[in-house]
Image: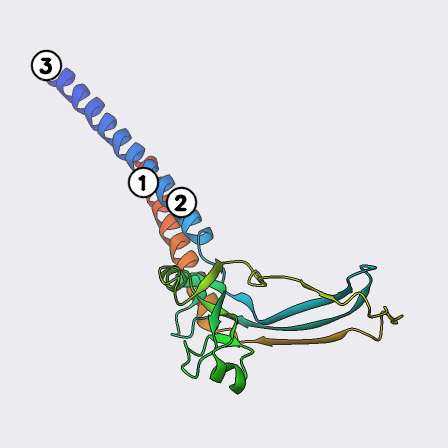
Amino acid sequence: MFDKSYNLSAVYTQTYIGKMVVSNELVVFFLLLIVSQVSAQNYYAPSITCYTQYEYEETKNQASNSVLGYAFSQAEITHYSTSEGELCSNVGCACFSYRSACSHSSHGPNHYSQCTDTDRHNRVVKWHRGFTSLSKCEQMRQQPQTYADLTCCHTDRCNDQPGKIIKIVDSNIQPQRYNTYVYPTASYISEVEKSPLQTSNALSSVAFSNWIICFALLFRLIIIMQSY
């Protein structure tokens, strides 16, 4: 009688322990599944498109407020990595714009301006634009004496500061009739850096390995549950 009750108690204990193991395995499984999904989604954008030149000037008559003309010049570049070779998908890339005196010394290959030799000689202050990593842009923010009116942003074409400039001319100038398809002076240039294959391959391999782990745990759970 004692042996029978002892064996029954042992069976119940073993079953209880088995259920606890299964329960713990299920918790681990679902936690890994959640983590794998979050890690597959929470990554920086693989590329960013930034202006390297943005000028938009509108000329108006002072008396009539009539538009006499406008000049528009725009250039942009799409990058998948920083100038240091860091992938945007790993470090996060940012566009920037700031005002700085034109100089013969360069801030780097990722800084662009419309400075001429005369501007550099006279230290004319102009807008500079470019791209870098989020962390490097924050470092630039700590140097306001070098990067005046700095803007750091992480969406495409966000570094268009100061936007449209309106130039008011003498009211004695008579407004001219322009054909809107003829009078604008406009230019547009777009460059795209070649996309590195390792970006998509790295993300795919991470997601694939996470799913392999999840399926392996699920298979193990099925085996354990069948044994009880």
Q: Where is residue 107 in the image (x, y as percent from the top left)?
A: 41, 76
Label number found at residue 33: 2
Q: Position of residue 42 (x, y in %)?
A: 44, 51
Q: Distance between the residues labelled 3 and 2?
A: 46 Å
Q: Which residue is denoted by mark 1 in the rendering? A: 28
Give the SS element for disc 3.
helix
Amino acid under label 3?
Phe
Amino acid identity at mark 2: Leu
Secondary structure, mark 2, is: helix
Vertical comparison of 211 with 27: above or below: below
Relative to the observer, which residue lies in front, 173 or 120? 173
N-term mark: 1 or 2: 1
Seen in the picture, residue 87 relative to 104 is either above or below; the reply is: above
Residue 14 lies left or right of residue 39; in this view the side is: left
User: The N terminus lies in which quarter of the figure?
Assistant: top left
**Residue 150, visible in the rendered structure:** yes
Across and down, in percent, residue 116 comes to 54, 84
Q: Position of residue 130 (x, y in %)?
A: 50, 70
Instruction: Give the residue at x 47% y 61%.
Output: 150
Q: Which of 156 and 163 is in front in this view?
A: 163
3D distance between C-alphas at marks 1 and 3 = 39 Å
Q: Name the residue under label 3.
A: 2
The residue furthest left is 2
Residue extending farthest to the top is 1
- Earlier along the polypeptide chain: callout 1 or callout 3? 3
Q: Earlier in the sequence, mark 3 or mark 2?
A: 3
Residue 69, picture quadrant: bottom right
Gap in angstroms between the C-alphas marked 1 and 2 = 9 Å
Please tell me whether mark 1 or mark 3 is closer to you in this view: 1
